Image (cartoon, helix red, strand yellow):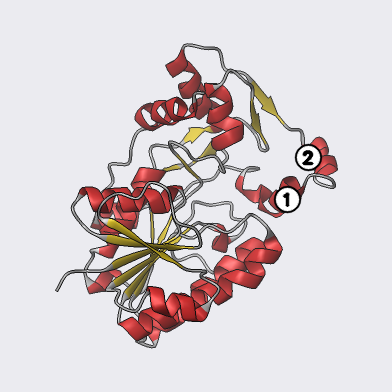
Amino acid sequence: MSETIVIFGLGPVGRSIMEQLTAAGRAVTVAQRSRPADLPALARFVSCDATDAEAVKRATASANAVICAIGLPYVSAGWVRDWPKIMTNLLVGCEAAGARFVMVDNLYMYGPQSEPLTEDLPLTNFGNKPRARAEITRLWQEAHSQGRVRCVAVRASDFYGPGVGQSIMGDTGLRAVANGKAATLLGQADLPHDMAYVPDVARATITLLDATEDAYGQAWHVPCAPTRTFRQILQIGADGLGVPLKLSVMPPILFGLLSLFVPFLREFKEMRFQTDRPYHVDSSRFAKRFWSDATPFEVGVPLTVNSFKI
């Protein structure tokens, strides 16, 4: 019997998962509201609004595995309203189909921390977006512990990669460098910050998709390249183009003022803890069990910069 893998969401991570699976000759079904224009031959499409329980049930009816790579608009009200509904729908669909469930997640659910992030940190009640991620984590953990769905989560730090615009190193970072503009940072330029490369996130997701049962029921951190600062990462991009690095850092006072008027800055305000202190992700547990050869910045950054050139 052939496998049926359903990927919900074809943003940068979902697309990379699809590409890696189909490159290995594995068929996938992409489920989201609108049909992508460039699906490979081994990918089929099903129209599905993940907030619609019946639509999710139809999309997952014949699935052996379901991967959630959904990215919602960066608006707290939408996260609080929609994420629990989406997670509930996905888990119900997986239970009905007998499918295992892989959640592609970030690290928001830990909230503000001052030490390296490990998978056993308690779930936070801080802020809207972190609290929403913590709530849906509890939902899949409960489904797994009750034996309803085999669940596993892959958690990644802020990511970057070819075509990734909505990221610290995206439109205002490496894309700006690629097009001769000043990169803009909302946090301190010289703080160390772990960054995950999107193809590595996809690779880790597939690793867990194919892992044995004992890997399920828990979360795993995606390995990152050795830690660099934001400035160092941007400098690699500039050096690859042979241009000087132009960098603008928004002062906290200006951020506070602009956040009163700029929606994105207002939404980012509760996430300042990710950029106002060193941000280290401990992926030693994943590395010990699976692999640790994350893509070096010297490889990933030039590929990203070149993808952004006009």
The x and y percentages for residue 292 are 28, 46
Q: Image quarter for residue 185?
A: top right
**Amino acid type at image mark 1:** Lys
Tell me if label 2 and label 1 are in contact, CB under 8 Å. yes
Front in this rendered view, residue 174 or 283: 174
Residue at 31% of width from left, 48% of height from top? Answer: 19
Dot 2 falls on a residue whose secondary structure is: helix
Residue 294 percent coordinates (x, y): 32, 41
Q: Nearer the viewer, residue 222 or 166?
A: 166
Question: What is the secondary structure assignment of the residue under circle 1?
Answer: helix
Instruction: Give the number of marks.
Output: 2
Task: Using residue 189 as the reference point, say whether residue 105 is left or right of it.
Answer: left
Residue type at mark 2 is Phe
Q: Could one spot residue 282 in this view of the protein?
A: no
Residue 269 circle label: 1
- Would you say 114 lies left or right of 283 here? right
Which quadrant does the N terminus fall into? bottom left
- Identify whether 14 is placed above or below 120: above
Tell me the residue at 59%/26% (across/down): 176
Front residue (pair 188, 90):
90
Q: Which mark is residue 130?
A: none
Q: Quadrant of residue 123?
A: bottom right
Residue 93 seen in the figure = yes
Q: Tell me if mark 2 has few (under 14), some (14-19) or many (20+) residues whose alpha carbon lies within 10 angstroms of its own.
A: some
Q: Who's the residue at 54% across and 76% down the image? A: 52
Residue occupied by mark 2: 255
Instruction: Give the class, few, some or many, for how many residues have Cα within 10 Å of label 1's Cα (few <14, many ≥20).
Output: some
**Residue 228: x and y, percent?**
47, 33
Relative height, residue 118 to residue 100 (above, below): above
- Image spot of residue 112 (x, y percent): 62, 56
Q: Earlier in the sequence, mark 2 or mark 1?
A: 2
Q: Which residue is most to the left?
A: 1
